């Protein structure tokens, strides 16, 4: 058996001992407590013997932090910076440095979890509410969500929602404006295929005349740059019984009539150019806005205003009952992790610039585009467009197009060579200067260029290429929050004020089951904001992005080594998207061997809600497989259902280790049964933190998995995104991984349809996972898994007796997480899992996962990064809370008015005076260490029902807070 040495926890030059929490002697102590002689023995006695694999991971020796940064610097230097005027949904932008440092580079923001615990998330909830408010204002819509993954998938979600909400049309036809972004059309094609929709791509007016359709997607302005009037097409569509989604450029809406005013039903797009670096494709926040009537069927998370138990305004995530956990295959979409951190940045860009600032930026972009166009006209170049915002398409002929693009490249500018059309397109951005315009003139005119100053004067101040009827008349961003923080001092303090309301990994452990909130190391994060990674356009020519290509290739190889699969696609930009891409690969594979009807997907009842939601999107019928009393898949039931549906069995989706926190003993057998009846095994790899280095899913029977790089591989959660959900497959599925319409990704899958807008999805954050694996090496990766298992078993041991540990596997062990059962307390004294979760806040902790996968329970995952001291502090808190419950059970404390039911407590409970029937000290300072620094929640317990009944999803007027203060 391979031995895992512990000396790495002690050598200070090694990263391994920084990433892993417990010291060498702590590990010995904890091993003793759980009754194992060594980490190897613990793992050997916990995983099923028939999946254990002691072959050392095929990874290089670990590098230390300095070495890693040096190698990454060399990789970054192989990417070449240009001024990017390619456009197509990605633009150069200036990230205000106050936002760069205090949000993007700040663990207080990027290590936060999705704001399920509203009381300790008021900061990012406010930031996301600002974002929603900004999107509503600019699009002219009534309601916006807190982000989706990218513009292309947002458009696909819009198509699905239009079908759901259109009660007038029976048609399955969907019309797509040929002027939509090519990657959007590509993503729509594959979505439509499995939804059973017919996609009609062309001129929307003509396509509408040709026949019925349930919906239309327009691009505003078009990918060619032309600004076309929306009103008449929308009216024509509505008259024909169709509904309309508009994919819009957010910055253009400062100057253009907003789609909402033209009658659009849904507006989507990207907020990337609001201060978020291009990052070779992502991550960026897509926005999604609807009319009020459609709010309850809208995909994604929505932030809303509610009240706390004292009736004060408080924010929280609204309409959560639409989520996948509850609605399963009937959910409004499979999107779970979105792009919270990037939405926060875009919203803050709006806050910092305000309406005047945004107007200046948009006007300057438009002005430079007008100068470019008029100069070209003066040079005799034909500019066909009648109206534009920031983009021009020039049909110059194939030869000239090639010459211009390559000369511009040499001059440091990237232009877009429109495939097959003998045309180029040029997009102006916030970073474009007059020098760039002059350079373009001389390249296009081969030396012959007009005088810029003279042209500027000649055009005059009032000149615009937007017809008067299409110019924006309405106000936007009038709310105080967009008009108050325009000096850096004010902005800095606003950001800090919000940050201070949120509990992040910078405060305490966040023991979220299935979410693996481990260390997001500084060294891993540093390269993300290097311009050589940030300022790269996803469609830049291959020759300019050799660094990225190397990084991607190496990371794919590392993930192959960690999983035992044969091929990896990094395109899916969240776990949900990896699931979808994986199921598409399964379906395409079945079709390729002449069995296209295999559309049944078996899913155990314990599965994460995204599983059934993704299967439904892949056009599959879900058959639920039961679990037995021990929490394992009921293998008899599985065999019966697999055999009953043998002709149509497409796949089994199984999470391993299971969402119950145990390694099912019979997983190999389960895989064999599915294969026996012709199905493929989809293994949800979100829990890979319990497997890396100990067992490889690609070797023990699974055909395909997604991983979550934002869980096991250290990408921070960002308060609800970004994420990356790479698809890992065995060889026979490799030809069916996603491709891209504009970029040759290499390999035999390059020509396939895309599942995301960018070829390698959120490439800009790949350096994080690359650095993690590089610094851990083969030995560190295995050690991390073993310590994750040790930490979880130590917690299970410490809490056992006080609480019931719901499921255990071989030798009474749990995997990397454990579920504790709180249902008995509901019986004995009306205390719920929510009361315990909120009481943990008083002790300074974020609650574990609540009521998933079993209602009335908490699922605890400490990860390997938490130290023994922190884990003990958490266990002490849980045990103290158990004592508090016991006092209620005994009747010593009132069942209604007690520290659990009223939790979390905050300073407002003291003013005007403490009125609870128990001492303030035990409520506010229940553990001794808290006197050194207590985290005070900004609000008391938030009322979710009230918020959903009275849905408000934009910033309330400032008086809403003031009124209360005066009460
Ligand atoms: C987190 C998780 C997912 C979904 O991943 P997202 O990135 O949030 O879409 C799916 N399955 C399991 C078991 C998970 O824990």
Image (cartoon, grey):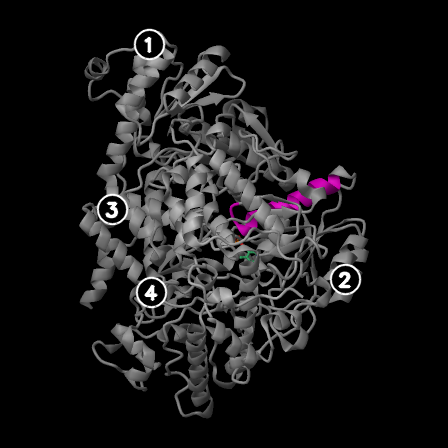
Quadrant hosting ligand 1: bottom right
Q: Would you call the spot at circle 1 few (<14 residues within 10 Å), some (14-19), or many (20 or more)?
A: few
Of the numbered discs 4 and 2, the one sitting upstream in the chain is 4
Disc 4/disc 3 C-alpha distance (Å): 23 Å
Seen from the viewer's position, the closer of residues 346 and 279 is 279
Task: Mark 2 or mark 3: name the one nearer the start of the chain.
Answer: 3
Q: Earlier in the sequence, mark 1 or mark 2?
A: 1
Please tell me the numbered disc located at residue 482.
Answer: 3
Q: Nearer the viewer, mark 4 or mark 3?
A: 3
Residue where numbered disc 4 is placed: 307
Please, what secondary structure does the residue beneath circle 2 have?
A: helix
Q: Secondary structure at mark 1?
A: loop
Residue 618 visible at all:
no
Q: State whether residue 43 appears in this view.
A: yes
CA separation, marks 4 and 2? 51 Å
Q: Earlier in the sequence, mark 4 or mark 3?
A: 4
The part of the chain drawn in magenta is: 573-591
Give the alpha-carbon distance from disc 2 to disc 3, as whole Å.
59 Å
For mark 2, what is the residue?
A: 669
Say which of marks 2 and 3 sits in front.
2
The C terminus lies in which quarter of the figure? bottom left
Tell me the residue at 72%/55% (across/down): 701
- 735 and 945: which one is in front? 735
Location of residue 893 in the rendering, given as x and y in whole percent from the top left corner: 39, 89
| SS class, disc 3 | helix
Q: Which mark is residue 447?
A: 1
CA–CA distance in space, label 1 to label 4: 65 Å
């Amino acid at each position: 058996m391979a031995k895992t040495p512990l000396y790495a926890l002690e050598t200070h030059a090694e990263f391994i001992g920084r990433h892993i929490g417990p010291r060498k002697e702590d590990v010995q102590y904890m091993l003793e407590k759980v009754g194992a002689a060594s980490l190897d023995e613990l793992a050997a006695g916990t995983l099923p013997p028939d999946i254990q694999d002691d072959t050392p991971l095929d990874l290089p020796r670990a590098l230390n932090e300095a070495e890693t940064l040096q190698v990454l610097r060399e990789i970054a230097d192989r990417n070449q910076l240009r001024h990017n005027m390619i456009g197509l949904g990605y633009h150069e932008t200036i990230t205000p440095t106050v936002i760069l440092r205090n949000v993007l580079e700040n663990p207080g923001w990027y290590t936060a979890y999705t704001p399920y615990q509203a009381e300790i998330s008021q900061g990012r909830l406010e930031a996301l509410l600002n974002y929603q408010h900004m999107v509503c204002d600019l699009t002219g819509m009534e309601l916006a969500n807190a982000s989706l993954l990218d513009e292309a998938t947002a458009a696909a979600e819009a198509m699905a929602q239009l079908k759901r909400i259109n009660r007038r049309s029976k048609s399955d036809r969907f019309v797509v404006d040929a002027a939509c972004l090519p990657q959007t059309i590509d993503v729509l094609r594959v979505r439509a295929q499995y939804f059973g929709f017919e996609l009609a791509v062309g001129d929307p007016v003509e396509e509408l005349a040709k026949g019925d359709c349930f919906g239309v997607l327009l691009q505003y302005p078009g990918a060619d740059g032309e600004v076309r009037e929306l009103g008449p097409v929308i009216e024509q569509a509505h008259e024909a019984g169709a509904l309309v989604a508009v994919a819009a450029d957010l910055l253009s809406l400062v100057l253009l009539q907003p789609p909402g005013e033209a009658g659009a039903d849904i507006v989507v797009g990207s907020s990337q150019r609001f201060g978020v670096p291009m990052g070779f494709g992502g991550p960026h926040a897509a926005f999604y806005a609807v009319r009020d009537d459609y709010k309850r069927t809208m995909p994604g998370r929505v932030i809303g205003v509610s009240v706390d138990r004292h009736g004060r305004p408080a924010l929280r995530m609204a309409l959560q009952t639409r989520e996948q956990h509850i609605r399963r295959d009937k959910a409004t979409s499979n999107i779970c992790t979105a792009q919270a951190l990037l939405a926060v940045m875009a919203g803050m860009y709006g806050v910092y610039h305000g309406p005047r600032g945004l107007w200046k930026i948009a006007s300057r972009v438009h002005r430079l585009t007008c100068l470019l166009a008029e100069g070209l006209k003066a040079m005799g170049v034909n500019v066909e467009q009648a109206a534009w915002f920031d983009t021009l398409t020039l049909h110059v002929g194939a030869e000239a197009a090639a010459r211009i693009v390559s000369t511009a490249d040499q001059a440091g500018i990237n232009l877009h060579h429109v495939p097959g059309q003998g045309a180029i397109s040029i997009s102006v951005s916030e970073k474009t200067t007059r020098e760039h315009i002059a350079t373009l003139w001389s390249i296009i005119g081969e030396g012959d260029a007009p005088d810029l100053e003279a042209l500027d004067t000649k055009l005059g101040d009032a000149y615009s290429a937007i017809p008067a009827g299409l110019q924006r008349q309405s106000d936007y961003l009038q709310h105080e929050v967009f008009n108050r923080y325009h000096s850096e001092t004010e902005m800095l303090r606003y950001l800090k004020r919000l940050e201070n309301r949120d509990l992040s990994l910078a405060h305490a452990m966040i023991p979220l089951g299935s979410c693996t909130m481990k260390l997001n190391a500084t060294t891993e994060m540093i390269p993300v904001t290097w311009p050589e990674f940030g300022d790269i356009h996803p469609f830049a020519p291959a020759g300019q992005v050799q660094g990225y290509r190397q990084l991607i290739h190496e990371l794919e190889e590392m993930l192959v080594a960690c999983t035992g699969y044969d091929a990896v696609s990094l395109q899916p930009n969240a776990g949900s998207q990896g699931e979808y891409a994986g199921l598409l690969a399964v379906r395409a594979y079945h079709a390729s061997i002449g069995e296209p009807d295999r559309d049944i997907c078996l899913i155990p009842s314990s599965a994460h809600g995204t599983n059934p939601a993704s299967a439904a999107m892949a056009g599959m019928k879900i058959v639920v497989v039961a679990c037995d009393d021990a929490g394992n898949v009921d293998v008899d039931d599985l065999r019966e259902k697999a055999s009953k549906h043998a002709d149509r069995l497409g796949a089994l989706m199984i999470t391993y280790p299971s969402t119950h926190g145990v390694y099912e003993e019979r997983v190999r057998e389960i895989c064999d049964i599915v294969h026996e009846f012709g199905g493929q095994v989809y293994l949800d790899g979100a829990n890979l933190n319990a497997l890396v280095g100990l067992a490889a899913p690609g070797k023990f029977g699974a055909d395909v998995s997604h991983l979550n790089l934002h869980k096991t591989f250290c990408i921070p959660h960002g308060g609800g995104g970004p994420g990356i959900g790479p698809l890992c497959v065995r060889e026979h599925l490799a030809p069916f991984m996603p491709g891209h319409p504009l970029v040759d990704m290499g390999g035999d899958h390059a020509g396939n349809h895309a599942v995301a807008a960018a070829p390698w999805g959120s490439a800009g954050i790949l350096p994080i996972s690359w650095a993690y694996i590089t610094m851990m090496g083969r030995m560190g990766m295995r050690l991390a898994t073993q310590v994750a298992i040790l930490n979880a078993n130590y917690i299970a041991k410490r809490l056992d007796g006080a609480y019931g540990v719901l499921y255990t596997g071989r030798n009474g062990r749990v995997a990397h997480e454990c579920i504790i059962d709180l249902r008995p307390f509901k019986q004995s004294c009306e205390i719920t899992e929510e009361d315990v979760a909120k009481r943990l806040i008083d002790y300074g902790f974020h609650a574990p996962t609540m009521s998933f996968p079993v209602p009335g329970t908490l699922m605890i995952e400490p990860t390997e990064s938490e130290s023994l001291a922190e884990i003990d502090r958490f266990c002490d808190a849980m045990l103290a809370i158990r004592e508090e419950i016991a006092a209620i059970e005994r009747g010593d404390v009132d069942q209604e008015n007690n520290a659990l039911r009223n939790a979390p407590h905050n300073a407002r409970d003291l003013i005007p005076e403490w009125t609870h029937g128990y001492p303030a000290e035990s409520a506010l300072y229940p553990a001794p260490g808290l006197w050194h620094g207590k985290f005070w929640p900004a609000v008391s317990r938030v009322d979710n029902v009230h918020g959903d009944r009275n849905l408000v999803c934009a910033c309330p007027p400032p008086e809403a807070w003031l009124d209360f203060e005066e009460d």
